[in-house]
Amino acid sequence: MKFKTTLLLFFGLLSIPLCAQVMEYQTVTVIESIIPNGIGRSRMISTEAERDYKEFTSERSEEDNSRNKADRGDIRVKNFEETKLLNFFNLGGIRFQNIAANDAVVTSKINAMAEEGWELAFVNSGVESYGGKDDENGIYVTRYIFKRPKQE
């Protein structure tokens, strides 16, 4: 009996790699303006377009240091989903209502993707903030990376 149980467990463990799922990933990028006076643009961007990074990649070496000649036009995606968001600032300063509204819209997108079988895997964020009276630039970027078992 012990031998049969051990044998069954052994073959069960061997079959685990055979059941491994291939995952697919989707990125949703949220860009929120932090430019004073509300003149910036805030958007949530996502695409279903696919690109193979290998088509736009070159390898450099000591012997071959030529630059990448990939055509930028081939990389661009013209069909994408663009959701308008509100800017963090208006003429009166920071608008907490705008931040709450953006949170509601982004949460709606996350919930819709969850219903489609996507799982939020990673979140990355970065900021290029207002740096003083001569700096009129500022964006807050958040990338949401989703994953799900690859659809065959």
Image (cartoon, rainbow, N blue to C red):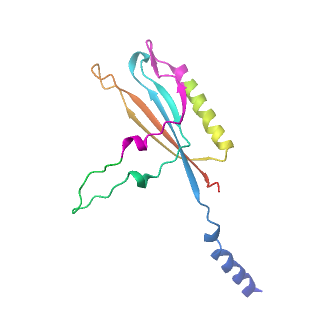
Residue at 40% x, 40% y is 73
Instruction: Pick out the residue farthest to the right.
Output: 1
Q: Is residue 67 left or right of residue 52?
A: left
The image shows a total of numbered marks equal to 0
Is residue 121 covered in magenta?
no
Question: From the image, which quarter does the N terminus lie in?
Answer: bottom right
The picture places residue 102, in percent across and down from the top left corner, at 55, 27
Residue at 63% x, 41% y is 113
Numbered range of the magenta stretch = 71-99
Question: From the image, which quarter does the C terminus lie in?
Answer: bottom right
Instruction: Pick out the residue farthest to the top.
Output: 92
Q: Is residue 80 left or right of residue 57?
A: right
Is residue 92 covered in magenta?
yes
Quadrant for residue 7, please give it.
Answer: bottom right
Q: Is residue 53 left or right of residue 104?
A: left
The picture places residue 92, in percent across and down from the top left corner, at 44, 12
Q: Is residue 99 above or below residue 17?
A: above
Residue at 31% x, 49% y is 69
Quadrant for residue 114, please give it.
Answer: top right
Give the camera-side residue of 7 and 77. 77
The picture places residue 5, in percent across and down from the top left corner, at 74, 82
Residue at 43% x, 52% y is 53
The picture places residue 121, in percent across and down from the top left corner, at 55, 49
Q: Is residue 21 above or below residue 73?
A: below
